[in-house]
Image: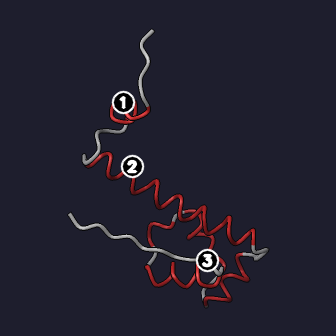
Amino acid sequence: MKTFTLEEVQDQVIGKVGTPARDKFEYNLQIDLVGKAIKQTRLERKLTQEELGKLIGVQKAQISRLESNAGNVTIDTLLRVFGALKAKVMLHVELM
């Protein structure tokens, strides 16, 4: 029986690093993780979506959308959300 590394499986199923398919997958994964981080932190801080929305001046529905899909949000909104959650935000940009 042949074994494969995780990297080999990812390359085969998702695509090699640097390909459009792999880039899209990794982008969507990161967006999903941001939404989950917002929800998890909000729950740890014992805030409802409505309470968090009031802290940053948006409706509960926007917080709900943000937690389920953070792909269509501005950096300003993300910074306000994480600021209200008292979370440290670090932005890393790497130009190639």
Earlier-in-chain disc, 3 versus 2? 2
Quadrant (top left, top right, bottom left, bottom right) of the C terminus: bottom left
Quadrant (top left, top right, bottom left, bottom right) of the N terminus: top left
Which structural element holds mark 2? helix
In the displayed structure, would residue 10 be above or below residue 75?
above
With 22 as the anchor, is 63 left or right in this view? right
Spatial distance from mark 3 to mark 2, Cα to Cα?
A: 26 Å
Q: Position of residue 55 (x, y in %)?
A: 67, 89
* Residue identifier under label 2: 25
Spatial distance from mark 2 to mark 1, Cα to Cα?
A: 16 Å
To which quarter of the image does residue 88 belong?
A: bottom right
Q: Residue at x 79, y 74 (%)?
A: 46
* Residue identifier under label 1: 8
To which quarter of the image does residue 41 belong?
A: bottom right
- Along the line of sight, which residue is nearer the eye, 11 or 65? 11
Give the mark toward the camera: 2 or 1.
Answer: 1
Q: Position of residue 6 (x, y in %)?
A: 44, 32
In the displayed structure, would residue 13 be above or below residue 48?
above
Q: Amino acid at mark 1?
A: Glu
Which structural element holds mark 3? loop
Q: Amino acid at mark 3?
A: Ala
Task: Assess whether mark 1 and mark 2 are in contact (beta carbons under 8 angstroms).
Answer: no
With 71 as the anchor, is 64 left or right in this view? right
Label annotation for residue 32: none
Say few, some or many: other residues with alpha carbon within 10 Å of mark 1 (under 14 / 14 to 19 / 20 or more): few
Give the mark toward the camera: 3 or 2.
Answer: 3
* Residue identifier under label 3: 87
